[in-house]
Amino acid sequence: MTNTRDTEPDRLPDPSDIAAAANILCGGGLVAFPTETVYGLGADARDGTAVAGIYALKNRPAFNPLIVHVPDREAAAELVRFPAQADALADAFWPGPFTLVLPARSDNGISSLVTAGLDTLAVRVPSHPSARALLTVAACPVAGPSANRSGRISPTRADHVRAEFGADAPLVLDGGASADGLESTIVDLSGDVPALLRPGTVARDAIEAVLGEPLSDLGEMMAGAPTAPGQLASHYAPAASIRLDVAIAQDDEGFLGFGPEMPTHNGPSFNLSVAGDLREAAANLFDALRTLDASGVPMIAVMPIPAQGVGEAINDRLRRAAAPRT
Ligand code: TXA
Ligand code: MG
């Protein structure tokens, strides 16, 4: 089994593909689109019927709000208010794999389905060239959760989206493999203290350096679970069960490893990064889980992965993937 990533550079967007996708969005339809984090399932965020289509296709609980994607900060400023700290974080991390939860403007036109009735809105300016082109041409705010059924592994390739939805798949704009491979870092600036809702490839220490203060932890709102801090809701779940911090896998297990010291294994195995590079491991994680899952093993054993930097996000996703399923 492969343990390297066939890194196609992000495909340059084809203008006719972008136009076709933008037409669908503007007509109230759904489009799956590439981003540097994972593929999104997009709809015009102002169109309640279109947004309802996202929840229906994903089978997503209606109380779990969506991120709105915009082409630039100016477009974001029409939707939310930017306190000084938000300006600093947007300067540092946009465009890129970074989402801000901010106080929503009351007249922003966003469907209340997107925010699940909250008075805050999550906004992101992605860097992927196809996403940017789509947002610019469609010229509407695009609500976009990850393009997977609720609770399952997020897609990092166009084929993952097609496999996930089968005959129900919307148009998938193919932008190659997502370079970051994990969902965006989410920081909430709507409360008294800045809070990290979801770790990602923009790591905690980089954000704290910009803020000049520590981030508190609130924990991501998760489908089907209370929003209690540190809640280990089941998410990112493959069909196989997952056990963490395993030194040597058993013969009937799949083995997910990391680094140059990965022990040999008789069954299916995947090394997230032979070099021990956490960014490479993040980019490979979801594809590796899908690949091992497809081999039919009942259990995937995972080697320990360092928790610093991007490792915080990798370990977060693995803990949720290993959490008891509801
Ligand atoms: O990288 C990403 O963020 C990808 C790509 C497609 O942009 N999108 C993504 O969306 O991961 P989704 O729906 O899978 O995750 C969005 C997360 C959820 O945990 C949701 O609860 C949280 O963002 N969220 C959205 N709006 C929020 C709000 N107003 N307050 C707090 N959390 C919010
Ligand atoms: Mg998701």
Image (spheres, grey):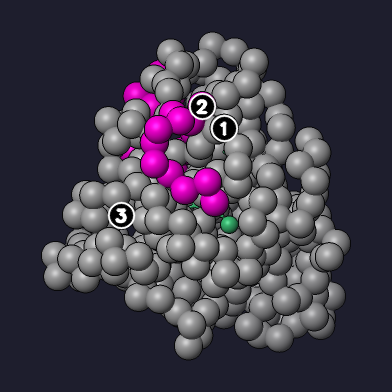
> Which label number is shown at residue 103?
2
Real-space Cα separation, disc 2 to disc 1, in angstroms: 6 Å
Callout count: 3
Looking at the image, is mark 3 or mark 2 earlier in the sequence? 2
Query: Tag 1 or tag 2, which sits nearer the N-term?
Result: 2
Check if residue 187 falls in the magenta segment: no
Pointer 3: residues within 10 angstroms few (<14), some, or many (20+)? many
Task: Check if mark 2's residue and mark 1's residue have beta carbons within 8 Å.
Answer: yes
The spot of residue 111 in percent (x, y) is 47, 48
Whether label 2 lies within 8 Å of ligand 1 gets the answer no
Q: Amino acid at mark 3?
A: Ala
Q: What's the CA distance linking mark 1 and mark 3?
A: 26 Å
The amino acid marked with disc number 2 is: Pro
Residue 197, image x, y percentages: 64, 36
Instruction: Please state, as top left, top right, bottom left or bottom right, where the C terminus lies in the image.
Output: bottom right
Magenta residues?
88-113
Q: Amino acid at mark 1?
A: Asp
Residue behind mark 3: 131
Mark 1 sits on what residue? 119
Mark 1 residue crowding within 10 angstroms, few (<14) / some (14–19) / many (20+): some
Q: Please tell me whether mark 2 sits on a helix, a strand or a loop.
A: strand
Q: Position of residue 173 (x, y in %)?
A: 31, 69
